[in-house]
Image (cartoon, rainbow, N blue to C red):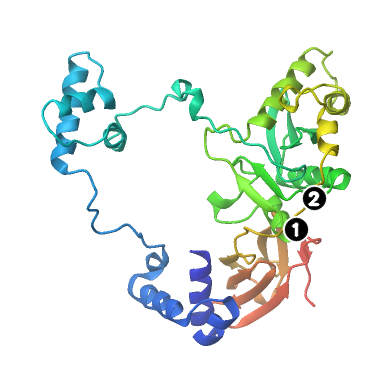
Amino acid sequence: MGMARYLVEAHLLEGRPVAELAASHGVHRSWIYKLLARYRAEGEEGLLPRTRRPHRSPTRTSQAFVSEILALRKQLSRDGFDAGAHTIHAHLARKHEQIPSASTIWRVLKAEGLVAAQPHKRPRSSYLRFCAELPNELWQTDITGWREVEIMSVIDDHSRLCVGAKAFTRVRAPDVVSTFYEAASRHGLPESLLSDNGAVFTAAPRNGRCAIESELIALGILYKHSRPYPQTCGKVERFHQTLKKHLAAQRPARSQQRLQAQIERFIAYYNEQRPHRSLQRRTPAEAYAARVKAAPRGNGHPPARHYRVRHDRVDAGGTVTLRYRSRLRHIAVGRANKGRRVVLLIADRDVRVLSAEGEILRQLTLDSGRKYQPLG
């Protein structure tokens, strides 16, 4: 809803023409008019995305078959027999000439909440192994807990080379950025980065962008996130198993600095000396050096501009606050506006502070290196 809300507020509060908004933001005027009509009729609810689900589905399983499948499931379960999709399929075949496939029956059961996920029963043949063709084509990153600290690691998917691993009391969003840049300073920028959906790796559930997302978009690096419970980040997770097995055999580090020293010694051994089974017994360093390196291509990204609308009140010091790249920024609008309710229209670093009546109190481009944005 970010961009839709932004366009509606820009038109209604500032009075900016629809044609100007459409041209400057790369959208069609008809869409903005549709948003305005929905907003006037339904309020903010009208700006929520609409479902694209079709009204009819000719290939959908008939309700008669759905009822019979559920009845068979209930009967078989009550009698203590196997009640899986293939068993139900066999019972239906005795009564009908044309019946749904076993996979369709499984989907019916799943839709009714009658199928419990059992990842440990997944056949090995269903796993698809993948490996990047070139060094720096894909980096994997993840965080693991070790006693009272957290360790963030980054490895190269092609060669398994550990390009960075650091220990923190607790990994925060700025720590992710600093660790990434330290790895890039030694090995160059990757074409893409893969991580899970932890809060320090993505702000998508919060309808925003976290620090590492903003940095990667600015660098033209493709950012990928794994799905829940897959083996997508398996290489870095396996690396963490090996690392923690090594650390467990060492004398407990009495400080974070000593732990980091242990990690660095392990990385040197892992990269330069330890032969890797999946690399035909070569070391990660040998595999990494054997091919030309990939580089950022700048493709596959969402639109670079991120739109938000924020309502706030000017504090006693004449400032309003805004979170940018996981840090609070304080924007001065003048003590004369103390206690005044304002609306912030945000397009990435471009910010306009408006009064409730639509008067522009301040317009600026955020200085990402400063927490306080002074007047002038």
Front position in the image: 133 or 37: 133
Q: Which mark is drawn over residue 219?
A: 1
Left or right, residue 51 beside residue 352: left
Name the residue at 63% across, 30% down. Answer: 234
In the image, is 196 to the left or to the right of 334?
left
**Which residue ends up furthest to the left in the rendered image?**
95
At label 1, counting other C-alpha atoms closer than 10 Å, the crowd grade (few under 14, some 14-19, many 20 or more) is some
Height in image: 155 above or below 85? Answer: below
Q: Position of residue 136 (x, y in %)?
A: 77, 44
Please tell me in which quadrant of the rendered image residue 164 appears.
top right
- Which type of secondary structure does the marked residue at label 2 adopt? loop
Give the Cα separation between the discs numbered 2 and 1.
Answer: 9 Å
Asked which quadrant contains residue 302, the reply is bottom right
Residue at point 70%, 70% (across, down): 318
Please provide percent x and percent y for residue 270. 82, 25
**Whether residue 53 is situated above or below residue 236 in the rendered picture:** below
> Is 76 left, or right, of 122 in this rendering?
left
Amino acid type at mark 2:
Leu
Q: Nearer the viewer, residue 107 or 331?
A: 107
What residue is disc 2 on?
A: 189
The quarter of the picture where the C terminus appears is: bottom right
Q: Position of residue 89 (x, y in %)?
A: 22, 28
Tag 1, which secondary structure? helix
Quick check: marks 2 and 1 in contact, CB under 8 Å? yes
| Marked residue nearer the N-terminal end (2 or 1) | 2
